[in-house]
Image (tube, rainbow, N blue to C red):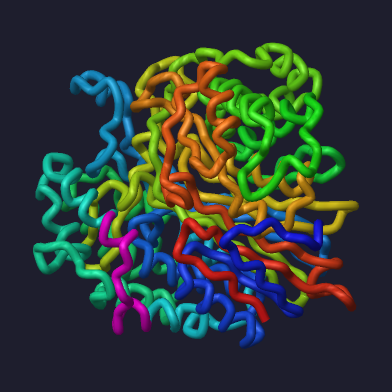
Amino acid sequence: MTPNRPLVPASLARGRHGGVVAPHHLATATGLDILRSGGTAVDAAIATNAALAVVMPQACGLGGDAFWLIWDAGSRTETALNGSGRAPADANPVRLRRAGLDRLPFRGPMSVTIPGAVRSWGDAHRRHGRLGRDRILASAIELARDGFPADEAFIGSVERTATALGGALPDEGRAWASQFRPHGRPWRPGEIVRRPALGATLERLADAGFDDFYEGELAAKLARGLKGAGSLITAGDLADHLCTLADPIATTYRGVEVTTHPPNSSGIVALELLNVLECFEPPPASAFGPEGVADPGWVHLGIEAAKLAFADRDAAVTDPVFHDVPVEHLLDRTYAAELAGRIHPSLAALPPASTAPRGGGTIYLASVDAEGNAVSLIQSNYMGFGSGVVDAETGVHFQNRGSYFSLEPDHPNLLAPGKRTLHTLLPGMLFRDGEPWVVVGSMGGDAQPQIFAQVVSALVDGALDVASAIASPRWFVEPADHFAPPVEVTIEPRFAPETLAALESFGHPLHPAAPFDSAVGHCHAIELAAGGPGADEGGVAAATDPRSAGLPAVW
């Protein structure tokens, strides 16, 4: 990495013993406290995730899903932990089509799948935890009961969701409003938000264990609340839900090993995108800097590669238990070269319409502990506050990941009982010479694999440090509306004017975002410098996205 950093508004925090990154400073402070108390990277990740579930309910929560990559420094192994939920046992696409539905609703009780995040906390803690649950969850409990100051991102999301939920729920969103808009008016900046019902739920998890969410007192309350809201999820569905462990999938990008989570995650999209980009000569390292990549051709190649990778995702990626996902073929170098050959060097292509909805509501976090263990974790509600379904007794609000399922009989992501849907979520890690180098990931719906590839290119091709790579201006391509072709390019205007003009001349419809706008995603990263904390001369270099409310926490 270059010692001379481009001038970008992002802090690069260096520490000797470990670090935590996340999109909210209260959460990174929570994770750092766990590390300093002797906790593992997994302990810190759970504590950080729980704090985020309190202070960023518009992006994550106990009613959502999670995907993990866990590097165990002692055994020198990396594990992919799948904490995504399944469709309930009574899910029946034929019945839904006969009822007149051609697709699942975006919000409401039919969009809820079994939340998998809390089960993943328990599984990860049993395998890699050191501190007790009461210690790990103490900060999140305190934030829920004593409150946290409302920030602009929370306030804006509450108001947008309140408008969207009007006709989507049987109770017209009253239960949701009782938890997130209790005064019947917008929150004022800095006003204290308290979530006592969620605090009690977290305290119950600390006392009874994470599995209580699925098999105990909490499970009974949640099942009762879901039934009352009109969901098909039962107590049996909760009890039957299990997480799964797998090997990560990987590719190499110019000698750097890039790992991510296998399907049903969209990690394969990021790897395929990188494989296509590797078929082309990158711009010189000097082209990467505070104005983004000073090469419109490189941006164009990334956009076009993303279109091709998304078409493959929509055609093939789903729960591999229910449908074969051709991972080996999609990551084959010969196939990447074939895709690269379809890209015109200066003309935007019109890809097929997307079969997945657009949007997102997600957090990404990473942690590295004093032994060099590392966690890359992404957790989500989807679409803002998710389904809008809230159990007021427990304070848990539920994801709407079920809206990603298809009702088309021949679609690989067809709804089925016990099936996991295609997920946008993807955690990542980079390795050099077999050693962990950077733990990295981002939120942002379909922007995630595109942001990931841009950051990897900035690190590898541009030799930027993690803070500069994260803060550099970025772009992503997506449909203009649900199920349209992904051609609309959201881009930060911090790119050089000539770069923007060239992209428009190639035929890309550009939609400028505000500089450092949260709409272009949050990416965070920790570099394990000189071998990381487990090495004699090692440490960490951490950065959170300046587009978020995060601050890197190291010691």
Residue 124: x percent and y percent? 60, 65
Residue 339: x percent and y percent? 70, 17
Foreground: 213 or 407?
A: 407
Quadrant of the snapshot with the C terminus:
bottom right
Is residue 7 located in the magenta-colored stretch of the structure? no
Quadrant of the snapshot with the N terminus:
bottom right
| Residue 324 in sight in this render | no
Residue 250: x percent and y percent? 75, 41
Foreground: 438 or 505?
A: 505
Q: Which residues are magenta?
A: 142-156
Hey, which quadrant is residue 396 in on the image?
Answer: bottom left
Q: Image check: 10 left or right of 148?
A: right
Foreground: 54 or 551?
A: 551
Give me the residue at 46% from left, 35% from top: 490
Main structural element of the magenta stretch: helix, strand or loop? helix
Residue 495: x percent and y percent? 57, 40
Hey, which quadrant is residue 536 in on the image?
Answer: bottom right
